Structure formats: structure tokens, C-alpha cells
Image (tube, rainbow, N blue to C red):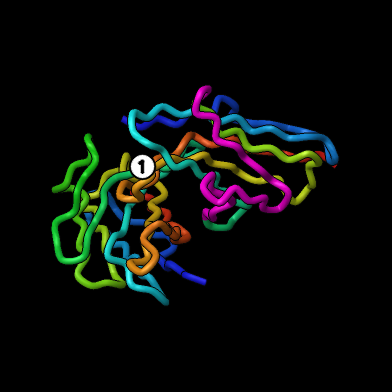
Amino acid sequence: AQRVTQPEKLLSVFKGAPVELKCNYSYSGSPELFWYVQYSRQRLQLLLRHISRESIKGFTADLNKGETSFHLKKPFAQEEDSAMYYCALRDLSGNTPLVFGKGTRLSVIA
Amino acid sequence: GAVVSQHPSWVICKSGTSVKIECRSLDFQATTMFWYRQFPKQSLMLMATSNEGSKATYEQGVEKDKFLINHASLTLSTLTVTSAHPEDSSFYICSARDHLVPETQYFGPGTRLLVL
């Protein structure tokens, strides 16, 4: 079974401070990990996926298979980063649906 | 970019009635669509996976007779909540996979259902 754990429901940081949103997973197969973001009153949208190894809006995430983690990081938080962030997992084959963590609400304080 | 729409965006109904929610892929064809449910302040929980032209696959604990899914075309999937009760009140979100780019999964804006 697939499981995604986001231990923090809410994370508040000051503008300009570093941000780390934690995500741990459990999966017996080969996982593909994602971060999705949901801004206020908007639909869920893909932020980044581990396969792409890219930085989107200053965010990065590295898959650590040893620690089964995929933490989301940004060195300097901006007010517009305030949103709900979901870590998600599916099989690397792409043949399974996304399974989501419970989400972390990031609040960036000016 | 790929867009998924849902209709209606919100619905209020009386207990015992049935409600149909539509999910459409607007500029791509989706052989696979997913239905999720999200309770307040909780995560998205997968309800079922629907494949065009075949029966939906339901997740454990989801009643297939209560949540009827029809994926009759490559751009439309419907979720019907039959004999709705207040505990069915939730946010229902569909997601569609572009058949040309199968690694994608695009999300609709969601439908808020309130059963009185």
C-alpha cells in the first residue's frame, strides 16, 4: 500500500525565511513523488515532480530513497507562497493514481 | 494548457435525492479519469478510477452502488451520488489523464456538495 505522510498541518514562517515542508512516504514499489499546491480559491496544480529535478517558483525537492522522504524547500519565502501544499505519490510506471498526503498549510508572514 | 472542468461547481440538495456531477477534459482526450473526495481540512481521498468504456475501479470502502461512475466518452466522466445523505456532503474533485501524455494528471476545480 502507498502512504504519504505530511507531519505538519500548518507551517508559519516570516517573509525571507527558509521554508521546508516535510513529506515522508511508504511504498514497496518504485515511487514517483510530486508536490501539488492549492492557492486560495484555486484548483490543485502541479508544483514539481522528482523526475524533472527542476526548480519551480524557487522551490526544490529531492527524493531521498534512504530516508523515504521528499521534502519541499525554498531558501527565501515570499508572501505569495502562502497556500496549501500536498505531497503525492504514484507508481513510477504512471499506471496508478496519485495518493496524497494530508497537506500542509504554509503561511508566510510579512 | 490542459483544462478540466466540473459542473456544477456547487450543489445543495435534500436528503434522499440523487446528484450528478460532470467532469470534462476540455482540450484533450482522457482515457482515464479519477474521482477524489475531500472533507474539510483533510486530504484528497481517491474514490475511484474510471476508464473510458469500461467499469470503474473503486477504492476499498467506497460503495459502488452509491457512487455511480460513468465514463462514456473520452472527454466526459460523471459521478452520481445516489440517495444522498448529509454525510455525503463533501468536496468532490475529478482528475483526468491525457491519453497522449499518460504521465499527466490534471485536476478539475471541484464540486461542493451539501446535503440537507
**Residue A66 rendering spot, x and y as whole percentages:** 51, 23
Main secondary-structure element of the magenta-colored stretch = loop
Q: Quadrant of the C terminus of chain A?
A: top right
- Marker count (numbered): 1
Residue in the picture at 49% in, 34% down: A102
**Residue A16 rendering spot, x and y as whole percentages:** 85, 40
Q: Quadrant of residue B61?
A: top left
Residue in the picture at 31% in, 62% down: B21
Up/down of A23 relative to B19, above or below: above
Of residue B58 and residue A71, the one placed in the foreground of this image is A71
Q: Can residue B39 be seen in this snapshot?
A: no
The residue lying furthest to the bottom in this view is B27
Q: Which residues are magenta?
A: A44-67
Q: Residues within 10 Å of mark 1 (few under 14, many from 20)?
A: some
Residue in the picture at 32% in, 54% down: B34
User: Which chain does the residue under circle 1 lie in?
Assistant: A
Residue B102 highlighted magenta (yes or no)? no
Of residue B103 and residue B22, the one placed in the foreground of this image is B103
**Residue B2 rendering spot, x and y as whole percentages:** 47, 70
Residue A57 highlighted magenta (yes or no)? yes
Up/down of B40 relative to B94, above or below: above
Residue in the picture at 26% in, 52% down: B49
Type of amino acid under label 1: Asp
Q: Quadrant of the N terminus of chain A?
A: top left
Q: Secondary structure at mark 1?
A: strand
Of residue A1 and residue B57, the one placed in the foreground of this image is A1
In the picture of the structure, the residue carrying the numbered disc 1 is A91
